[in-house]
Amino acid sequence: MGMATSQLRLMYLHAYRLDLEYKIQLITEAKMNLSKTCTDLLNVGTDLDSDDPMVKMLEARKERLNIMEKKLDMQMQQYQKKLEMINAEYDSCEKMLSDNISRSFKY
């Protein structure tokens, strides 16, 4: 690969890495909000009778929130794996560019 191509590849990988890090940050924030909502649901249901239909509705909502949290965990794991691959590719491309520079400007 030429130096210009390597530099463009590095820029693309850097942008993609930033995009993945941003998505991971959004998922982390969403998980925090889900946890807060679950905690709020648990606090609301503590003063109700266990046979009350409202308690059953709160439990169903809590289960849906747990399912959403599991989906977010899976998505975060995918993004983290992609990020690891991007970091490895970035390091490889950076090494290749450094080697090209050292060969091109060798006296």
Image (cartoon, rainbow, N blue to C red):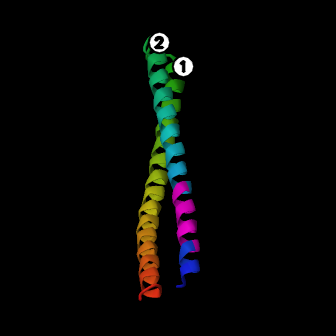
* Amino acid type indicated by mark 1: Met
Does dot 1 land on a helix, a strand or a loop? helix
The residue that appears at 43% across and 77% down in the rendered structure is 98
Quick one: label 2, few (<14), some, or many (20+) residues within 10 Å? few
Q: Residue furthest front?
A: 107
* Residue holding disc 2: 48
- Whether residue 76 appears in magenta in the rendering, the answer is no
Vertically, is 41 above or below 88?
Answer: above
| Amino acid tagged 2 | Leu
Q: Is residue 15 magenta?
A: yes
Query: Who is closer to the viewer here, 12 or 19?
Result: 12
Give the percent coordinates (x, y) of residue 34: 50, 33
Q: Position of residue 67 (x, y in %)?
A: 48, 42
**Side of 91 where 68 appears, left or right:** right
Question: Nearest the camera: 62 or 28?
Answer: 28
Helix, strand or loop at mark 2: loop
Is the C terminus in the top left, top right, bottom left or bottom right quadrant?
bottom left
